[in-house]
């Protein structure tokens, strides 16, 4: 067995960034140590897929993100790994605890199937895998191997943590250490007549922005056509992950404004991201949701957006400011305000026309080209 402190002390010699994930019982000694280290920057994700987005955002800033999950959550990372990190060639370090390991004592019934396929599933989705070091002498070699691979291949690496490898470590919970303060839902006296298309809105939004992460589908395509630049990260695939990737960037770049251009279908897919952003409150984060109440990129099928007040939900989740707008004047006014406001995160909910716009072409850049020039520009 090893002390989690020894492992963490070794990886802190690498250029690591944010640590994030969803707790698991076998991971507890490691997670408890990380939570107790002030400079480790632990982000308590609400889902494993969100954790991948946060870690990817951290890695794009030049500091490799770390994800800690139980193997029961491997299914939740398949899409963001196969359509985001591995396609864009963004490395992160994954630490997976192995519940239901056939070689260990019987576990809870729900871990049986995943326990049997853990290693093969990690291999199948294209993550370099090795066992978590089981004694102190193995730590340096194992960590060096993982980070050498990530630096050389620009792809994620994983440690599989088996039972009885880590010594126990108790986290002393500090109660009442989060001061909840209700944000401001801004009033809007404009007529609720929707006058903007997605293209109209993006043309206004692209006039004044710093770092931008845009969600998959028509929004990234339109942004590329309207104003392509290295500071834009165009997401293709990994739907629902734009908000978390933007969060990872914003937390590592606190002196830069980060805008996330999201869609109603995308944010509804990972609605818990609102809570994570609201909890950590990056002051430099502006979340724009272009809401046409449908899936415009796939033919205009209806979304559940008419049943949801995204502005109210953002405020309830901890955002400092939020508003819903319908026309060009209000969009320009509040976009300018939020871009220059130092009290984020803010959510700008933009109602756009329910029309199936003609799909513009995809960005004329490969995913690695998008990621590389984005990383170079934000880290210059």
Image: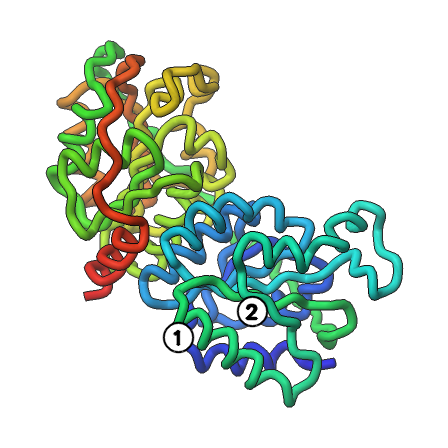
What is the quadrant of the N terminus in the image? Answer: bottom right
Distance Cα–Cα, label 1 vs label 2 = 16 Å
Total count of labels: 2
What is the quadrant of the C terminus in the image? Answer: bottom left
Image point (40%, 39%), residue name: 237
Front residue of 102/326: it is 102
Front residue of 328/359: it is 359
Image point (51%, 39%), residue name: 272
Image point (45%, 77%), residue name: 148
Q: How is the image coloured?
A: rainbow
Secondary structure state at the residue bearing disc 2: helix
Image point (39%, 59%), residue name: 90
Closer to the chain start, of discs 1 and 2, is 1
Asked whether the viewer can see residue 342, the reply is: no
Q: Which mark is residue 34?
A: 2
Tell me the crowding category of disc 2: few under 14, some 14 to 19, or many 20 or more residues within 10 angstroms, Cα based. many
How far across and how far down the image is residue 130, in percent?
Answer: 61, 71
Front residue of 320/71: it is 71
Examine the rendered structure and indicate whether residue 306 appears above or below residue 75: above
How far across and how far down the image is residue 42, in percent?
Answer: 50, 62
Q: Is residue 5 left or right of residue 314?
A: right
Residue tagged by mark 1?
15
Residue extending farthest bottom: 137
In terms of image quadrants, where is residue 171?
bottom right
Tag nearer the camera, 1 or 2 = 1
How far across and how far down the image is residue 330, in percent?
Answer: 18, 24
Examine the rendered structure and indicate whether residue 1 appears above or below residue 175: below
Secondary structure state at the residue bearing disc 1: loop
Proximity of marks 1 and 2: CB atoms separated by less than 8 Å = no
Q: Is residue 130 left or right of residue 180?
A: right
Examine the rendered structure and indicate whether residue 189 appears above or below residue 90: above
């Amino acid at each position: 067995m090893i002390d989690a402190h020894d492992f963490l002390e070794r990886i802190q010699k690498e250029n690591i960034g944010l640590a994030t994930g969803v707790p698991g019982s076998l991971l507890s000694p490691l997670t408890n140590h990380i939570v107790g280290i002030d400079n480790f920057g632990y982000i308590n994700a609400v889902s494993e897929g969100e954790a991948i987005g946060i870690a990817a955002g951290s890695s794009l800033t030049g500091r490799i993100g770390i994800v800690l999950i139980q193997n029961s959550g491997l299914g939740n990372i398949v899409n963001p790994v196969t359509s985001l990190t591995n396609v864009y060639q963004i490395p992160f370090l994954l630490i997976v605890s192995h519940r239901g390991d056939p070689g260990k004592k019987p576990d809870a019934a729900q871990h049986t199937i995943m326990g049997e396929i853990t290693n093969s599933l990690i291999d199948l989705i294209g993550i370099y895998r090795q066992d978590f070091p089981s004694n102190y002498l193995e730590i340096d070699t194992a960590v060096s191997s993982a980070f050498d691979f990530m630096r050389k291949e620009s792809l994620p690496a994983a440690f599989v943590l088996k039972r009885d490898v880590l010594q126990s470590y108790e986290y002393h919970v500090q109660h009442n250490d989060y001061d909840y303060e209700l944000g401001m839902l801004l009033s809007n006296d404009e007529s609720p007549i929707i006058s903007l298309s997605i293209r109209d809105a993006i043309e206004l939004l692209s006039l004044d922005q710093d770092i931008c992460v845009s969600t998959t589908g028509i929004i990234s395509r339109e942004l590329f056509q309207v104003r392509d630049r290295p500071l834009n990260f165009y997401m293709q695939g990994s739907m629902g992950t734009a908000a978390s990737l933007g969060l990872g960037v914003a937390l590592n770049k606190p002196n830069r404004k980060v805008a996330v251009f999201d869609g109603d279908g995308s944010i509804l897919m990972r609605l818990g991201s609102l809570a994570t952003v609201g909890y950590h409150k990056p002051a430099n984060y502006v979340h724009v949701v272009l809401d046409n109440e449908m899936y415009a990129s796939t033919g205009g099928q209806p979304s559940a957006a008419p049943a949801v007040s995204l502005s109210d939900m953002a405020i309830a989740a901890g955002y400092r400011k939020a508003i819903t707008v319908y026309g060009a004047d209000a969009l320009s006014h509040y976009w300018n305000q939020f871009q220059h406001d130092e009290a984020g995160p803010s959510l700008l909910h933009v109602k756009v026309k329910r029309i199936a716009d003609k799909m513009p072409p995809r960005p004329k850049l490969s995913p690695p080209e998008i990621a590389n020039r984005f990383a170079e520009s934000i880290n210059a």
